[in-house]
Structures are given as structure tokens and as C-alpha cells.
Amino acid sequence: MKMTVIGYWGAYPEVESATSCYLLEQNGFKVVIDLGSGALSRLQQYTSLDEIDAVILSHFHHDHVADLGSFQYFCLVNQQLNGKKNNVPIYAANDGETNFDLLNHVATKGEAYQVGEDLTIGPFTFSFLKTKHPKTCYAMRITNGENSLVYTADTAFFPELIGFTKGVDLLIAESSFYQGMDGSKAGHMTSEECGRVAREASVGELWLTHLPHFGEQQSLVTEAKSLFTGEIKLAHEGLTWSTGE
Ligand SMILES: [Zn+2]
Ligand SMILES: [Zn+2]
């Protein structure tokens, strides 16, 4: 099981980088989690787009889905040029918003996930928790049966996040704000809140992501360290976590 950061900015990408996007792999099976702005280009530093088996989306804010349409065009061109027959599944919650319909395209198909139902994608099992965010959004807990990780997606702090994250090997937490700020109205967490979730859930390692475009991002790590004494890393493109495959 291998997790690689592709995009890590909140809101918009800075030069030669991308907003939310992560590549999850095991034994050659590849799942892309969120497809933010700039992600499709950066992703090709790490995989051929042709090798992507599935995409899963946390929510429909632009910094998580901006490159979805371009990915669907890739799938279409790939079918036409290379005769690939299977439509690529794109998983998201179907909350009655018209956004879900966008997932069905010539060479992609929308697949719905739900809170309370485990979802199997290749070697991975996903479970979901609705987060506190202005647009309906889901955190994901992912396991391969041996190891596990949680991706918070976008959310303000709420206590249920701790139980959902309990004991995972890796927590990828959004840290859109710095210590002492209030992210709750915007539906985002601070570095301190990420540290608190990591500590109270006893996670193995904490990554801070969905980074702000102001301040010294490295201080997010220092701030989270005041609450969580385990390994903390600031997300950057190519940051990788892996267990024996
Ligand atoms: Zn976001
Ligand atoms: Zn969002």
C-alpha cells in the first residue's frame, strides 16, 4: 500500500503544483483521490494516466475536481486511440446534487458511495464520514486489510473525526489555518486541531495538507507538534508513505 501526494494546496495551485490530489497504489492497482486544479499534469510525473483504475472524489469544490473534465477527455481519447473498452469508474456521493451526473461521460461512469456502507475498490476498502464543510464532503478511511489511513478531505474540527480516525497508520489532515485562528466558519481545520485529532486517535504519522497561501507553512508542523509527538510531515508533491506490498 503506497500513498503519494500529487496536489496539496487549498483553493488554487501555485506555480508547477496542484490542489488536492493523491495517488493510492497496491500491486499495480491505482486509485486517484480527488482531482484538483493542476493535478492531471502533475500526476503524470508519477503514473501514466492509462494505468488509473479508479477515481474517488471527496466533494465537488473546484480545488478537488477542477481537472475531472480533462481526465474524462483523456479517457475518451484513450478509448478512441487505443481501443480501451472499460469505462473508468469515478466514485462520489450522490447527494441529489446535479454534480454527480457529471461523472457519467463517454468513457467514465459515476459510482455512488454512502456513509455506513464499505466500498471495495480493487485491494482497498473505503468507509466514509460526512464532514463539517459548506459543500457536502466526506472523509475517507482506507484499508488494505493490514494497514489503514484516513484522508480528512475538507472539514472543520468535529469530535467524530477522532473516532473515525482511531488507530490508523497515517492521517492526512487538512490544515488550512494556523494555530489560534478559527477555521470553523469556513469549514476548515487549524494545525492545532490536526495535532489534536492525531493525538487523540493515536495515529502512526500525520501529514498536513490543503495548505494555505499565507504565512510560513512549515510552522504548521511546529504548531501541530505541540499536541502530537509522533512523526509530522508537511505535504509536498511526491511525498510518499508505503508499507510492504
Ligand atoms: Zn478544498
Ligand atoms: Zn471544499
Image (spheres, helix red, strand yellow):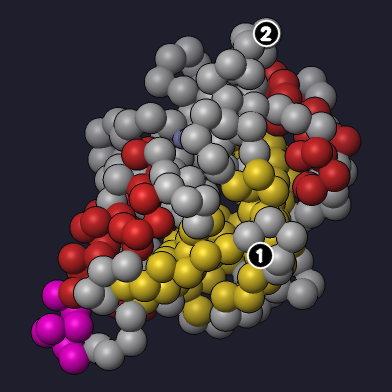
Where is 81 relative to 16, above or below?
A: below
Q: Is residue 78 magenta?
A: yes
Residue 152 on image: x %, y %:
63, 43
Q: Is residue 188 magenta?
A: no
Rendering quarter of residue 41: bottom left
Q: Residue furthest left?
A: 81
Residue 245 on image: x %, y %:
65, 78
Pointer 2 or 1: first along the chain: 1
Q: Residue furthest front?
A: 96
- Give the crowd class for mark 2: few <14, some 14-19, many >=20 residues within 10 Å: few
The residue labelled by disc 2 is 180
Which segment did they paint magenta? 77-83
Question: Can residue 23 be spotted in the picture?
Answer: no
The residue located at (47%, 69%) in the rendering is 111
Q: Residue furthest top?
A: 180
The residue located at (42%, 34%) in the rendering is 9
The residue located at (66%, 44%) in the rendering is 130
Residue 102 on image: x %, y %:
31, 58
Pick the front one: 119 or 43: 119
The residue labelled by disc 1 is 126
* Residue 55 shown left or right of residue 233 in the figure: left
For badge 2, the amino acid type reads Gly
Residue 138 on image: x %, y %:
60, 47
- Determine whether the residue tagged by mark 1 lies in a helix, strand or loop: strand
For badge 1, the amino acid type reads Phe
